[in-house]
Image (tube, grey):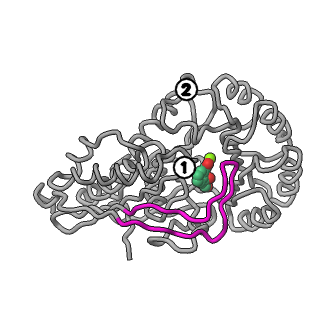
Amino acid sequence: MRSMPADTLIVRFELLPYHLPLRREWRSARGAIRHRSGWLVRLIDARDRTGLGDCAPLPEAGTELPERAGQALRLLARALPGQTPPQALSALPAGPPAARAALEAALLDLQAQTAGLPLRRLLDAGAPDRVRVNAALGPLDAGARARAAAAAGHGFTVLKLKVGLAPVTEELAALARIAAGLPPGATLRLDANGAWNEPAAAAFIAGCRALPVESLEEPLRHPDPERLARLQGDAGFPLALDESLAGGTPPVPLPVRRLVLKPATLGGLRPALALAAQARAAGCECVVTTTLESAVGAWAAAQLAAAVDPASRRAHGLATGAWFARDLAPAPSPAAGWLSLPSAPGLGVAIP
Ligand SMILES: O=C(O)CCC(=O)c1ccccc1C(=O)O
Ligand SMILES: [Mg+2]
């Protein structure tokens, strides 16, 4: 039965701080992290339904600082009781991106539950029930070859590795050894997280010619559009913008063939979906991932991924649950490179 508006009023909110250790250090050209901290946002409506959102700021990935996120969460959440989710969503101010994304996700979770729809179908009526994902293999270190071979053996065809952590020639040699151990069809998604100047990036890209590279994220320390466009012209695979999309409007025309969309740096699922539509109109492809978030943030991004690319032509990120020593809820757990999404209304995740 359709709920009356009074049933859907938000009656209270909770901001629950959390601290989750990682199993192993997460290393990239922007530094290393050993844990993720943030707030679980819980909105409760008059029928006792719960909407969940995750706010885990990671400034080096393009979010606000934690102190700023905490302030914004408290301020923005205070305005929600007494409103319905659609009212609150249309009045949600800009605010810092990770805090805004968490509140928006919790509101969308409630709205989708009220509508009786999985969250992805609120975003796109044709969103499918599964998405392709990459294997998140961490840095190109001594163990990377074994991790890549194991992931390929488990059916992942896109293997993501962090590069830009050692000299270009060493990394190219390591990638060639990894590629030699992969089955046909397995590809490498590489992420330099802004490690290089233009000559180093050009040398790396030239050295990738004989390798099965699927894409390369954020090659440049100073990602100005002209340099990126030159590099993209010489690359036989998509270059991608990721953290350099945070906090601004994307360059027009887009200098690369791909965008990596993260709700926490773009201010939420709907801003990310709008950017995806804009990119698609310009002939640019999109993949969705997180800033290494708890299961709550990862499931929200997974719902977005289904809406962004209904045909699931490209693998998304999202499969980072195994990096966490513990989590707030069961994390997305892919099989053979595919992630099945919950059929339950809303976000589809509950906190035990
Ligand atoms: O996309 C994935 O598979 C893992 C997520 C990831 O790489 C990431 C995690 C935290 C911060 C930045 C990034 C990134 O893509 O640059
Ligand atoms: Mg990236």
Residue 322 picture quarter: bottom right
Whether label 1 lies within 8 Å of ligand 1 gets the answer no
Quarter-of-image position of residue 336:
bottom right
Amino acid residing under circle 1 = Ser
Q: How many marks?
A: 2
The label number, if any, that marks residue 153 in the structure image: none
Is residue 135 visible in the rendered image? The answer is: no
Q: Which residue is mark 1?
A: 312
Residue 212 percent location from the top left of the image: 79, 47
Question: Would you place residue 12 above or below residue 272 in this image?
Answer: below
Left or right: residue 243 versus residue 191 is: left
Residue 8 position, x and y percent, is: 17, 58
Residue at x 47% of width, y 65% of height: 295
Q: Determine the CA span between mark 1 and mark 2.
A: 25 Å
Q: Main secondary structure of the magenta part?
A: strand
Q: Is residue 81 left or right of residue 199?
A: left
Is residue 26 highlighted in magenta?
yes
Residue corresponding to mark 2: 251
* Label 2 secondary element: loop
Above or below for 14 versus 108:
below
* Residue 25 in the image: above or below residue 55: below
The three-letter amino acid code for the residue at tag 2 is Pro
Q: Residues within 10 Å of mark 2 (few under 14, many from 20)?
A: few
Residue name at image x 68 percent, y 57 percent: 27
Q: Which residues are magenta?
A: 16-40
Crowdedness of circle 1 by 10 Å Cα count: few (<14), some, many (20+)?
Answer: some
